[in-house]
Image (spheres, grey):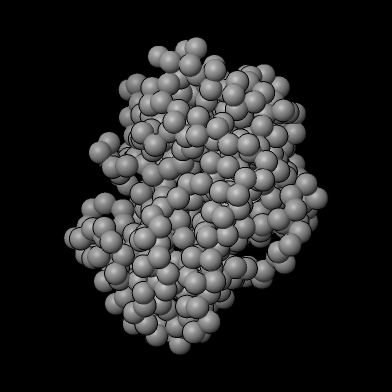
Amino acid sequence: MITVEGVTLQPDPILDLDAVALAAATRRGDLTCSEVTRTYLSRLTALNGRLRAVITVNPEAQADADRLDAVSAERRGPLHGVPMLIKDNIDVAGLPTTAGSALLAGHVPDADAPLVTRLRNAGAVILGKANMTEWANFMTLAMPNGYSSAGGQTVNPWGDDVDTGGSSSGSGVAVAARLCAAAIGTETSGSIVSPAHQNGVIGVKPTLGLVPRTGIVPISHSQDTAGPITRSVRDAALILTVIGGPDDRDDATRRLPVPDLNVLPDVLRGAHLGIIRDETGVTPAESAALDHLTAALLDGGGVLHDVTFPSRADLNTHGWSLEVLEHEFKGDLNAYLRGVTSGPRTLQAVIDANDADPERLLRYGQTLLHAAQGTRGDGTEPAYREARTRDLRLTRTRGFDPLFAQGLDLIIFPGIHGYGLAAKAGYPSLALPVTAPGSTRPGGVLLVAPAGGEGRLLSLAADLNRLLGGVRFPEL
């Protein structure tokens, strides 16, 4: 129950439905798109002042929902009437795309990103744009998750002292707080699975190339992808089915066959699962969640194998590197900024504008922007080519691939350890909530599958999520 300015909002059963159930109800006519959207907009309005999960509310959302109610039953799509939020580095026609920077507050694209077009064609209602860590957390190492000069500091609904995760912070918070039925985030390295993990919901980073990146403010063409943040695994599968597939303007999408994303039941029995237990820096809470998960795996008939990541020693020796991102960011961002409607048109212009207004725009610095600007940004530097080759060698050929070659269906990490390995490899990963006995805060594990293995990943995750009791929501 929520009281805002003396008005009490009663619990609404509409908010208890996941996207799959909600779309089924609106397609049948049990619910109208209009009443569903009105319910979510009321909750969003009531809570967003506290949570700051949404930068821009779509003024056409209610009208869009009303129009969907006039669509004939046979033409209603798989997401008919499902209210969704889009991370604010993804173009939505008529709404600002800021990437969290106040510098881009006037940039209003004329066209949707292809993934947004696909959502609309499937019947989704775009409620607005979700807050995010500024420049997708590639501005400075000092910036807290969920902060942006455009949207302020996002707050985790589980508690003011709980990290929101990032950079898709608003997307994760909004799904956990039920400000939307589902959201879209983006990830270069951890930016979907981190906020999903911190907010106790489902987050899927798909195989690089499954979802088009056209119309998305970039960091790295070698690692960027968009993906769903949801309250159920079947929602994630449905949304990936809608937004996945080739795009003529994104070469990576033409190199990857679209996998079968149907979630199959009862696939856990006999599945071979590799458990990583020897990660450094694992917290007691992460260990407890992993132990709780392994008990559920055994109950479900999974075959467990304790494994070590094969290239771990070399990774420890080389340390963690941002070289690939630093070298790709300048060229990729400049290509996007050439099309902005209002605001800086180059990375150097962004840096200069930030320097000119430090009190408003440089609260935490811009060390990563300077590092990227110092590169050629054209992929020709030997240091870049060596870094990319090293990343692929340590994460693919000497990393995940030998494990999957042993017949393992998934690799499971405590917490979200391993997110960077999956990101550099371009392999799919999924943040699965796991609540250990006695825990009052979100916890979970990271599941990683081979490239193109989303179908198996989602089916196994759905089985596990069911065994673990599903997603919990904070009391708001």
Q: Residue furthest top?
A: 356
The x, y position of residue 265, in whole percent, is 53, 77
Nearest the viewer among 32 and 467 is 467
Residue 388 on image: x %, y %:
57, 55
Q: Residue at x 56, y 31 (%)?
A: 373
Where the N terminus falls, by quadrant?
top left
Q: Is residue 221 above or below residue 152?
A: below
Q: Is residue 210 above or below residue 212?
A: below
The answer to which of 127 and 149 lies nearer the viewer is: 149
- Of 318 and 159, nearer the camera is 318
Q: Is residue 165 visible?
A: yes
| Residue placed furthest toward the bottom | 270
Establish if 373 lies above or below 234: above
Quadrant of the rendered structure where residue 358 is?
top left
Q: Quadrant of residue 309?
A: bottom left
- Left or right: 283 in relation to 459: left
Can you tell which quarter of the image residue 298 is in? bottom left
Q: Residue furthest front?
A: 382
Instruction: Give the residue drawn at x 62%, y 68%.
Output: 452
Residue ID at (59%, 24%): 348
Residue 360 position within the rendered picture, expressed as x and y whole percent measured from the top left: 43, 16
Q: Position of residue 404 (x, y in %)?
A: 51, 78
Residue at horizontal 63%, vertical 36%?
376
Q: Is residue 41 left or right of residue 275?
A: right
Task: Report whether residue 465 is seen.
Answer: no
